[in-house]
Image (cartoon, rainbow, N blue to C red):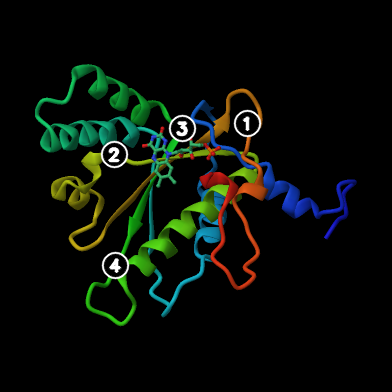
Amino acid sequence: MTSTASSHSAELDFLLSRASTDHLVAPAPSKEKIAEILAAGLRAPDHGKMRPWRYVVIKGKHRSEFAELVVKAMLAADPDVPAKKIEKRRQRFSDMPMVIALGMHLELDGKIPVIEQEMSAAAGAMNVLNALNAEGFGGFWVTGEFSDQPDFLAALGFDAPHRLAGFLFVGTPEKGKPHAKRPDVENYMAFWKGEPVTFGADK
Ligand SMILES: Cc1cc2nc3c(=O)[nH]c(=O)nc-3n(C[C@H](O)[C@H](O)[C@H](O)COP(=O)(O)O)c2cc1C
């Protein structure tokens, strides 16, 4: 570990500096690079070795094909969805340099509660966001009410109970590494001293 002037490690500095951006341009990670980055997802804590992570990478000419699937699923979820919302999603899913569908392979009847499998999948996605940042790329996690549509999931290769935790938009940050104002940790932590705690964040 390398020491910094503020006395914590470069690694912690790196984690503290992560921010999302959806202003993403080419290049996206190469085939080899995205495999290295996704390997970080598989380092998430995983009770019972359930290995719920399933990453579907959508790139190149398949992006616009996938965007049409998104539109179809949006209309199936809500036939009255405004045309403006459809067009915005169509454009975002077609234009992002890369999209990663965050599949969750879930076992409903085993010993490990489904929520723990979902949390492991979510922890994996966070690791992927950090790995993207480490390799000079940017990421943005999105969800959508359309993504539970059975036909949409089937087109990706997921049949119930397997489903998605959302999508990562992936590419190179258009304006360099993003920055975000963060809340003060003092308001989000407390030391328990035998009595119920209160948090500054909740006052
Ligand atoms: C599970 C999950 C789903 C999200 N879905 C959306 C979304 O659909 N649209 C959106 O604008 N932001 C969404 N976000 C928030 C962004 O990914 C991002 O975290 C937010 O803009 C704040 O940026 P930050 O990550 O730098 O704090 C989602 C975040 C999570 C964890």
Three-letter code for the amino acid on which mark 2 is drawn: Gly
Tell me which amino acid carries mark 1. Answer: Pro
Q: Which residue is situated farthest in the top direction here?
A: 84
According to the image, label 1 marks what residue? 178
- For the residues labelled 3 and 4, the Cα–Cα distance comes to 29 Å
C-alpha separation, residue under disc 2 versus residue under disc 1? 24 Å
Whole-angstrom CA distance, mark 3 to mark 1, is: 17 Å
Residue under label 3, please give it: 97
Q: Residue 106's mark? A: 4
Q: Do the residues labelled 3 and 2 touch (CB within 8 Å)?
A: no
Image: 202 above or below 157: above
What x and y, as percent, mark residue 58? 37, 42
Residue lying at 50% horizontally and 59% vertically, measured from the top left? 41
Residue at the farthest bottom position: 111
Q: In which quarter of the image is the N terminus?
A: bottom right
First reached walking from the N terminus: tag 1 or tag 4: 4
Say which label, 3 or 2, has the lower sequence index. 3
Amino acid type assigned to the residue bearing label 4 in the image: Leu
Q: Does the residue labelled 2 lie within 8 Å of ligand 1?
A: yes
Identify the residue position indicated by label 2 in the image.
Answer: 144
Pinpoint residue 115: horizontal percent, then vertical percent. 34, 66
Image quadrant assignment for residue 121: bottom left
Q: Is mark 1 within 8 Å of ligand 1?
A: yes
Disc nearer the start of the sequence (2/1): 2
